[in-house]
Image (cartoon, rainbow, N blue to C red):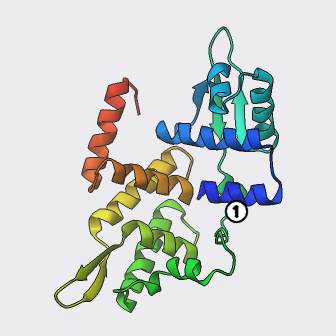
Amino acid sequence: MEHRAFANRMRRTPLSMAAQLLWYKLMDLANSLRWPEHFALDNSRLCTMINTTAKRTAISARQELIDGGYLDFTPGIKGRPSTYHLRSVEEMEGWQPPPDDLEGDFLAEFKEDPTSYFGYTEALGVELAETTAHLWAEFFPGKTPGPYDEKRTFFQIMVQYHDEETDEWSISFPEENKELLGYAFEQGRKRGKLFWGYIESVMRNLRDCGIKTVEEAYENEEKFYERRGWNK
């Protein structure tokens, strides 16, 4: 969702192509590092990211991101690399759901509607609302989730099954998936990144690692920190 929020902003108030490319490259780097609060980067690698040998071009692109509120930057001292912190564009845009890439496109809206999926029932709708409300009570006390939040929850926890013998479809929300989503929210809270873009990136990383239970998620987290000699 961060990419879509950034793309929406670029339609309204575009940055230079170098600055836009740098933002995407920094996002990829942050994602590969599992979204640390800050990460280090020297000017040589900064230039490589946007395929330029001109230090001035890279610094100018970085300054555009700083001026636009997309990036916090702390210069390095005594030979140490500079540190970077990417701000959430989704938070800058607010909590309103981003528009579809093709406004007015019925198919795009249809795919985003949980009730359009084969196997969806009213009972599932109640369970979805309860699951989302439980997350909000834990992580956003005093706030109420909206339809957009229920949609995002749906796509993170749902499993759709097709019985070929009966040609019937069914949808379920396995407890393991609910617990993993809760884990992703907890990771967001620890890092001050409680927004859907970050939470969905955590869920993608879990799936890419083949993690299916919250116990496996914590084990993987422990191994990650042990390999790097970091403290949580």
Q: Position of residue 128 (x, y in %)?
A: 41, 78
> Image quarter for residue 22?
top right
- Answer above or below: position of 170 versus 24: below
Name of the residue lying farthest toward the left: 165
Q: In the figure, is residue 51 to the left or right of 37? A: right
Q: Residue at x 52, y 76 (%)?
A: 112
Q: Within 10 Å of the Cα at label 1, are there few (<14), some (14-19), or many (20+) other Cα atoms?
A: few
Q: Position of residue 221 (x, y in %)?
A: 34, 40
Q: Position of residue 38 (x, y in %)?
A: 58, 33
SS label for mark 1:
loop
Q: Which residue is mark 1?
A: 94
Residue 91 is at least partly visible in this image:
no
Count every numbered label the image shows and give the total.
1
* Nearer the observer, 120 or 95: 120
Q: Position of residue 90 (x, y in %)?
A: 65, 57
> Image quarter for residue 52?
top right
> Image quarter for residue 196?
bottom right
Q: Residue at x 35, y 65 (%)?
A: 178
Q: Residue at x 46, y 62 (%)?
A: 138
* Nearer the observer, 35 or 32: 32
- The amino acid on which the numbered mark 1 sits, given as a three-letter code, is Gly
Q: In the figure, is residue 223 to the left or right of 102? A: left
Placement of the C terminus among the 4 image quadrants: top left
- Answer above or below: position of 24 versus 52: below
Placement of the N terminus among the 4 image quadrants: bottom right
Residue 47 is at least partly visible in this image:
yes
Q: Residue at x 75, y 21 (%)?
A: 55
